Image (spheres, rainbow, N blue to C red):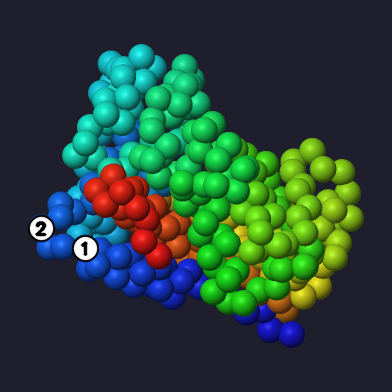
Amino acid sequence: MQTQRLEGKPVAEAIEVEVRAALRSVPASTRPPALASVHRGVDGPFRFYLKRQRQAAESLGIRFREEVLAAGEGPEELVGRVRTLSDDRAIDAVLLEHPLPAPFDFIRAISGLSPVKDVDGVSPLSLGLLGAQRPLHAPAVARAALAIARHYGLPLARHRVAVLGRSETVGVPLAMLLLARGVDATVTIAHSQTAALADALKGASVIFSCAGRPGLLTRANVPQGAAIIDVGLSRVEDRSAPGGGRAVGDADAADLEGWAGALTPVPGGVGPVTVAELMGNTVRAWQLAELGEVRG
């Protein structure tokens, strides 16, 4: 059996086609959407993610603005910055980049943001709406994982699937999306404290892994033939790679080759789709603010 490679690029391109269509459907006089990214700097892997956000936004005609916290600004300034953007009628969407180091309180800061502008769907109010199956925006990473599964026709409805991870920004919202009416998956949630992981994953046709633990998924715990959407992203040391390190997911791709039915690559899988979904959420926020509705 050859393991199918689930590339993210064609999925992202299909989402971008829908975004462009939504933008073309409004009068030319309507102002373009605007997205603000709030962050503390561009060190490490975040530099690449921020670059992809800007490139995607500019290619679609979405105005992109960076809100960078200065070195001397602390938690109170972050809370104030988010509230100011929430009240700014020229900004449709706000993304607070995370995780944040101590003493910054991500939940406190994001709670000051209007759920209409919370395009990453991670505030307590946004997650509550998702749990009630009435979301304004679902987290872009969770939407991306589900979009890949749908694009490649992976079995979800009336099938058992597993979510490996329980973070409030990925694992929990992804489980809620999979449980929603219209998706109708039967969901098992496992995490770092799950004993006998192989038993927990037994019978799963699709595994969504967002644990952030390199090499966690192997033949020893993945059911043969299962498809894996690998949301995990870690950096491991590799002296042969540029910068002395490389990005890896939760799945041991080499070990699972010929065993798993399908697998997303890392990088090149969930990442580009996440950026496309973020742009889609931005346009939906803009439609609510500018048009008073969400089309399509």
- Packing grade of label 2 (10 A; few <14, some 14-19, many >=20) is few
Q: Quadrant of the N terminus?
A: bottom right
Taking the image as shown, residue 131 lies to the left or right of residue 9, namely right
Residue at which label 2 appears: 29
Residue nearest the observer in this picture, 188 or 284: 284
Above-or-below relation of 76 to 275: above
Q: Quadrant of the C terminus?
A: bottom left
- Corner quadrant of residue 130: top right
Q: Residue furthest left?
A: 29
Q: Residue furthest front?
A: 292
Give percent across and percent down for residue 209: 66, 55
Q: Residue furthest bottom?
A: 1
Q: Amino acid at mark 2?
A: Ser
Residue 248 seen from this side: no
- Corner quadrant of residue 27: bottom left
- Packing grade of label 1 (10 A; few <14, some 14-19, many >=20) is few
Give percent across and percent down for residue 143: 52, 56
Above-or-below relation of 34 to 100: below
Residue at which label 1 appears: 26
Q: Amino acid at mark 1?
A: Val
